[in-house]
Image: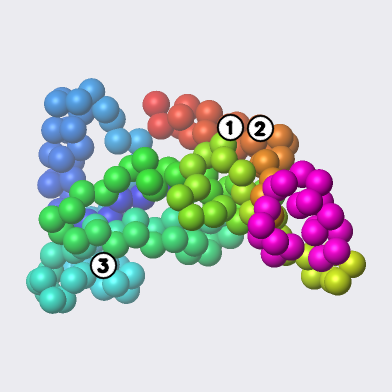
Amino acid sequence: MIGLSIDSNPSHLAWLNDIMLKTGIEIPFPVIADRSGEIARKYGMISSNVSTTETVRNVFIIDDKGIVRTIFIYPLNVGRWIPEILRVVEALQVADCNKASTPANWIPGQPIIKQSPTTFKGLQERVREIEKDKNGISWYLSLKKSDEKCNKQIEQNKTLNEKIGK
């Protein structure tokens, strides 16, 4: 994680100290001072219809290959909802590890959507599977549980992140 703000480094230090004094939480990631707004402008973080200098609250989820997977853009007057951000990170991990998709309103632990078959034979097998297991509505939309190996890997990542954050 990285924080980016157009505020000064002394402002960041005061903000981090205030959080620690009032909550006991030490922010475990760097906060970068982007005084000119150059980085914020490159990432579309300046809301020109609100101000030429005030940033909106953006959250970029970037994977280990450097690919931006998700961008949340919050207006200045709306706070971020951390549980949703963490849910999306887990959904990306579950979907990637299982080569599947998460459905709308998915929460961790719920079934995921299997990849659609790519051949007619695969379609026929899927139809039989759905009839037998009652795990979908059609050949292109059937569900499965996340692979146990994937679940263990995701839990290990969470544990590691919690240790790093302390």
* Sequence-first tag of 1 and 3: 3
Q: Which residue is mark 2?
A: 152
Q: Residue at x 29, y 62 (%)?
A: 73
Whether residues under marks 1 and 3 lie with C-beta atoms below 8 angstroms apart, the answer is: no
Note whether 55 is above or below 21 in the view shown. Answer: below
User: Disc 1 to disc 3, how far (Cα)?
Assistant: 32 Å
In the displayed structure, 109 sits above or below 32; it is above
Q: Position of residue 88 (x, y in %)?
A: 46, 50
Q: Are marks 2 and 1 in contact (CB under 8 Å)?
A: yes
Write the residue at 48% across / 55% down.
Answer: 104
**Where residue 6 sits: x, y (%)?**
18, 60
The kind of residue tagged 2 is: Lys
Q: Which residue is mark 1?
A: 155
Which residues are the magenta region? 123-141
Residue 49 visible to the viewer: yes
Residue at the spot of label 3: 45
Marker disc for residue 105: none
Q: Place residue 82 in its image quadrant.
A: top left
Secondary element type, mark 3 = loop
| Position of residue 128 in the picture relative to residue 23 (left or right) | right
